[in-house]
Image (cartoon, grey):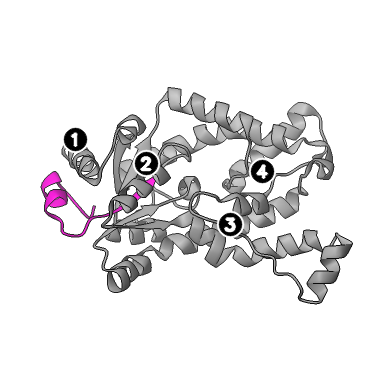
Amino acid sequence: MLYQTAGDWRAATEKRVLLFGMSGLGKTHLSNLLRDAGGWFHYSIDYRIGTRYMGEHISDNFKREAMKVPLLRELLLTDSVYIASNITFDNLAPLSTYLGKPGDPEKGGLPFDEYMRRQEQHRQAEIAALLDTPHFIERAKAIYQYDNFVCDSGGSICEVVDPDDPQDRVLRTLSDNLLLVWIEGTEAHTEQLIRRFDKAPKPMYYQPGFLRAVWAEYLSKNNLKESEVDPDAFVRWAYARALAHRHPRYAAMAEKWGLRVSAHDVGQLRSPADFDALIAGALEDR
């Protein structure tokens, strides 16, 4: 690891961390806290994906929909309007909307093959955005004079790496440049995330093998054709399975490539000094 002991961490003049774990457990909240306090550069993987690597896919999809409306079609064909996403660190709706959900087109669903094509686009984009991290570390220092750096990774990072492979390109690149920190939730957090997702199901990225398996199981279990699937019902059903699928992968990443802190403790942080103490304690306990 980049910092082997609590003493290494406390003495470091440049603190660099990557936060990972399920969406909703505090990665972006903590990153914002560090950035807003000053002295920390915040690099969002999801924002990078949605702007640099999938921005054109997203805006083209908007335009494709707009072309179905006669007034907007005419304006687009005459370059009279400009259509683009307004993605931000805290609003990733354009990216989620593009990823979509499989199922009945009358309910906003995508054909499964198209859904899988967009999932593959996201996989490639996420890997590229993660591998861009060292560049942004240097950029933050050279341009903005930030010594401290926090990488706010997406919940699906565990889907695009192999924590059991000591030569995994993404994990090797990240661990050579940052301390990887898992924000671990409890069973109570998991139940809360499931309830929250049930109220507002959103698109997510999944490993292809996992996704094909749960899709086939859902069709068989409910005796449905692809076009008959309620998109929201499917992603609700798949979400709890995704949490169970991801947990051991996060745990392996923390065990072999970094360390873990609890979501409860992260929720109590109020300053960068609190964060420093949390990481030092986790290193001492490791």
Separation (CA) of disc 2 from disc 1? 17 Å
Image quadrant of residue 85? bottom right
Q: Which region is colored magenta?
A: 1-20
- The numbered disc on residue 212 is 4
Going from N to C along the chain, the mark reached first, 4 or 2, is 4
User: What amino acid is labelled 1 in the image?
Assistant: Asp
Residue at 32% over, 73% down: 143
Going from N to C along the chain, the mark reached first, 3 or 1, is 3
Contact (Cβ within 8 Å) of mark 1 with mark 4: no
| Residue 72 picture location, percent across and down | 82, 64
Does residue 19 show up magenta in the picture?
A: yes
| Residue 156 picture location, percent across and down | 50, 47
Q: Residues within 10 Å of mark 3 (few under 14, many from 20)?
A: many
- The numbered disc on residue 285 is 1
User: What amino acid is labelled 3 in the image?
Assistant: His
Going from N to C along the chain, the mark reached first, 1 or 4, is 4
Q: Residues within 10 Å of mark 2 (few under 14, many from 20)?
A: some
Nearer to the camera, 16 or 32: 32
User: What amino acid is labelled 4 in the image?
Assistant: Arg
Q: Secondary structure under badge 2?
A: helix
For the view shown, which residue lies furthest in the bottom direction?
Answer: 78
| Residue 4 picture location, percent across and down | 17, 49
The quadrant in which the C terminus is found is: top left
Separation (CA) of disc 1 from disc 4? 39 Å
Q: Secondary structure under badge 1?
A: helix
Image quadrant of residue 14? bottom left
